[in-house]
Amino acid sequence: MVGKRTIAVGLDGCSWNVLEPLLETGRLPNLAALRERGSSGVLESAVPFFTGPAWASIATGCSPASHGIYDFMMLRPDGKLSVAGQSDLRRPTYYHHLGRDGLRSVLVNLPLDQDGCEGAVIVNSWLTDDPARRLLPADRRERYEPLLRAYKTFPDDPSNLDELCGIESARFELARELFLHEEWEHFFVLFSSTDWLGHQGTGLFLGGDDGARASFLRLYEQLDSYIGWMLEREPEALVVVLSDHGQCEETSVLRVNAVLHELGLVSLEQSAPDDESPFFVDRRRKARRSIGIPNALGRYRSHRLVRPFALAAKKAIRRGLDIEVTRASRRVNFAASSAFSPTDASFAVYVRESASHEVERIREALLAVKLPDGRAAIDDVWTPEELYGEAVGDWPPTLLFSPALGVRPATALKDGAVSAPRVGGRGCHQRDGIVFVAGPDVAAGELGRSSIYDIAPTMLWAMGSAVPRGTDGRVLTEAFEPGFVSTHPLTETEPVPVEAGAPESSGNDEVERRLKALGYI
């Protein structure tokens, strides 16, 4: 059958609780038009509903238990963490299938450390720290070198709106040139700053803060104009706008390893005292430099009577800081622990075989954790087999969990399993994202609730390609006019073989720094 050209635009971390009020302003005309003339609804994410595994699920049409990626940073059999890469995938992506069928793709900023794909031009995301693999294949780099020099994948300060807008401007400049000068049947671009800004201020936005509303509107207006530019140049394309998860207000922090520590299953690092280790000495030194005389006394600090009190207050703050740094340094020893959660983004507990008899006790303990308002901190806990019917990978999680709305899991081992956020008004991942499907032959109306696994098979089908067997998603035929559906029968094919095995990772320290700066781990 004759297939369509497709354009997929990702708005990372976008959800209807934020987008709906912005649409009502009338200042996002292109997104509003897509919603009016197409099908739209809620896109339910995977578990974990975090950027790394969720976008891998979108790309493969499969669950994390099937494609093998559960986190940004993969836990390896030796207990170390390294960046999730293309060779971690146990299922092929939709663009691998398109390449096999002779269809060409351009992909900008998909959150997976990629090595290349037949028929695809790839701009790697901020999970790739190697400049030599920023743009693939390598023979394209010289053509786009000036734009690559200006291209920045990650903000120095995620709270700086000017910087976020500048990053997306540079991303679009590069995407626009690829859009115009590469041959493609499928074009994908992900804008990450919607998620970064969401982490900084979704709670403020939902609470009616005018400054937060102005910030969100400014960023979304900019991205709306980029979408409009693409629609103007490809009016006959099938357009999918989607997010991998949504955001809500962060109301509580759940320290999973604290729960496991109370069960006697977590072991701590037994190295030199934390407050004397080079890492924490350097951390404390940097933190001390950032502490000035308290604001209330600062304006009078030169006064001979006030200055001694101001300096005393400054020393007290520093002493308190030493205590907090030492507490925060209680690090989990993965190799020695019977059970542990590796990162804030994993939504998982790994249990060693020697402690397999503890799995049910761990599940019960997690489900028993209560928030200050009496609600359960975790909605449910499953084994991968219970949740997805299978579990693959070199070391799959023993248990996966879904935190309650507004609860952010954390792995830092501090006193108590639940605490209030350090800063109010921030955002927290929720499972429900957004999806728009628009273009010729698309039916206007509400799409209802769909799964992120449905995106890959729907695009493959609409482009005239066969859908690989074993995909967890389905084709969203209800988004299309009946006449189009009746003349485009679904065909299936065997998945393109993928090479298994852990990649040789590079730049893990830098990627980990970026994840920590965003509050992801």
Image (cartoon, helix red, strand yellow):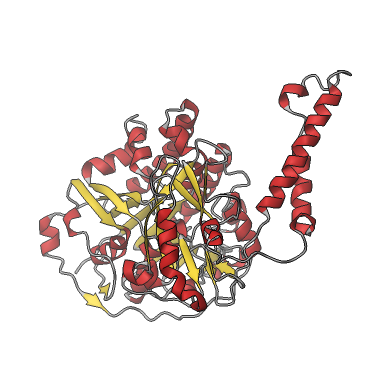
**Is 202 situated left or right of 390 in this image?**
right
In the image, what residue occupies the spot 26% across and 78% down?
493
In the image, what residue occupies the spot 59% across and 55% down?
412
In the image, what residue occupies the spot 35% across and 49% down?
433
**Is 418 situated left or right of 450 in this image?**
right
The spot of residue 343 in percent (x, y) is 54, 60
The spot of residue 226 in percent (x, y) is 41, 44
Of the pair 9 and 174, the residue shown nearer to us: 9
Of the pair 310 and 62, the residue shown nearer to us: 310
Asked if one can make out residue 368 in the rendered structure from this viewpoint, the answer is: yes
Quadrant assignment, res 361: bottom left
* 47 versus 94 height, above or below: above
Of the pair 144 and 432, the residue shown nearer to us: 432
The spot of residue 482 in percent (x, y) is 11, 57
Marks counted in the figure total: 0
Asked if one can make out residue 110 in the rendered structure from this viewpoint, the answer is: no
The spot of residue 488 in percent (x, y) is 16, 66
**Is 188 situated left or right of 115 in this image?**
left
In the image, what residue occupies the spot 77% across and 20% down?
299
- Please state, as top left, top right, bottom left or bottom right, where the C terminus lies in the image: bottom right
* 207 versus 53 height, above or below: above
Of the pair 135 and 398, the residue shown nearer to us: 398
